[in-house]
Amino acid sequence: MAAATVLSRLSLIPNLSSKPKLKSNRRIAPTSVSVRAQASFSDPFVLHLAESLEDSLSASSSLPLQRIRESSAETLLSTPWPSRKDEPFRFTDTSFIRYSQIEPVSTHQRNSEFLDNLSETQFPNAVIIDGFVSNLTIGPSDLPKGVYFGSFAGLPDELTNRVSEFIGNFDSGDLFWSINGMGAPDLTVIYVPEGCKVETPIYLRYFSGETGDRESKRLPVSNPRVFVLVEEGGEIGIVEEFVGKEEQGFYWTNPVFEVVVQKNGKVKHSYLQKESMASAHIKWTFVRQEAESEYELVEVSTGGKLGRHNLHVQQLGPDTFTELTTFHMCVNEQTLDLHSRIVLDHPRGSTRQLHKCIVAHSSGQAVFDGNVRVNKFAQQTDAGQLTRSLLLKPRATVNIKPNLQIIADDVKCSHGAAISDLEEDQLFYFQARGIDLETARRALISSFGSEVIEKFPNREIRDQARNHVKCLL
């Protein structure tokens, strides 16, 4: 079949290296080099996974999506599965995925029972099941003229070329980024034209339609992919919510969210991760900001046996503003990991990052690796980074690595980190006023996360996140 030819063709390319290749619209011509000669460059497990992803996809796909698949296939041929020996995964154990029987979800039969039990929302919204937009709800006056929200296949002809310019042109991520590129069955697009301000946020609700079996270790994997383009002066809010079908559902969600914010554009991004406690959730968010643009992220993550968010932001022009506010809470035997990277290359850039986490289980672990790189020409940068962690149980673990790399010499940069249990003075204050110890602890824990939750720009999302955290506590 046509879709199954990408890996076989790319496996013939000589001189493969582990460095990401530059993107190209040109298809790669086959050569006479033997496939067997190239086998030593490949991890057999990764190669088998890539082939199974290809076999699961439809032979027909859009040109940008096919371009992403070819680039991802080339990368997968020379990228091994990560281990604890690799610095980015030093504290993040992915072995439970590696030693499961990974199966791509079916692209032909999608479970639509979610649609019968969805809570109502006032926002224009989409239900994305296993990477496909299965239900799109947009009122006649919800979106201004010129705004597009839907599958790439439905883009008007006049927008197809414009959007295609940016798709597949991001710097390569890690193995999981490439797995998504290889296995994404569709591409959801949000387009905001020049000067357009979208008052009502767009709400994306993700579900995994298939769950596996922990005993047999059958692990279905889905690869949702979303691309956002905000033209000059445009503004929009986007909400992503990932929800587990069952409390102990066994599956792997591997999403990618790409954003291009052009000059003077603004994006407010809200992200709630509430996957099942037995699942894996490994997400990539990649943002490119041009001059005088703004990107703000607010995140609350609580789900997954393994939850990891790879968050990369590139400031590609002067006077650019980035704000990242995140909260992770481990209440089970789970690992929640935030790996963020902000790269500043131009003058007068500004970044603010606050990361908070709570580990409330003796086998729980939180990981934070935050990198801010201020390059030579990013003079007069103002960058601040702060991480605070609460460890509420014996043997609860947090590994943090705040990291500033400063090459410019005219900057104002700071970072800080704090790890503690609840303070005895605060608990005594409550008890002195007749409040029992357990109620006092719950109040202090709730207030710790509220600093992040209150940053959500919409009341509906704030209330939802607050209630969710209270239920977990």
Image (cartoon, helix red, strand yellow):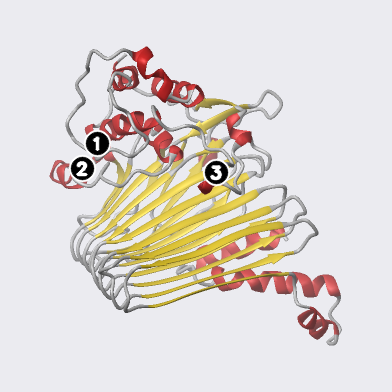
Closer to the chain start, of discs 1 and 3, is 1
Contact (Cβ within 8 Å) of mark 1 with mark 3: no
Contact (Cβ within 8 Å) of mark 3 with mark 2: no
Q: What residue type is labelled 2?
A: Ser
* Residue 374 shown left or right of residue 215 in the figure: left
Percent x, y of residue 122: 44, 59
* Mark 3 crowdedness (10 Å alpha carbons): few <14, some 14-19, many ≥20: many
Q: Which amino acid does label 1 sit on?
A: Pro
Q: Which mark is residue 281?
A: 3
* Residue 105 shown left or right of residue 2 in the figure: right
Q: What residue type is labelled 3?
A: His
Residue under the point 20% across and 42% down: 164
At mark 2, the secondary structure is helix
Q: How far apart are marks 2 and 1 (CA)?
A: 6 Å
On the rendered image, what quadrant is the N terminus found in?
A: top left
Q: In which quarter of the image is residue 175?
A: top left
Q: Distance between the residues labelled 1 and 3?
A: 25 Å
At mark 1, the secondary structure is helix
In this view of the protein, which residue sits in the foreground, 140 or 276? 276
| Residue 388, above or below 20 | below
Residue 422 appears in view: yes
At mark 3, the secondary structure is strand
| Residue 352, above or below 340 | below
Percent x, y of residue 304: 62, 45
Name the outermost residue toward the left: 158
The residue at which mark 1 appears reads as 64
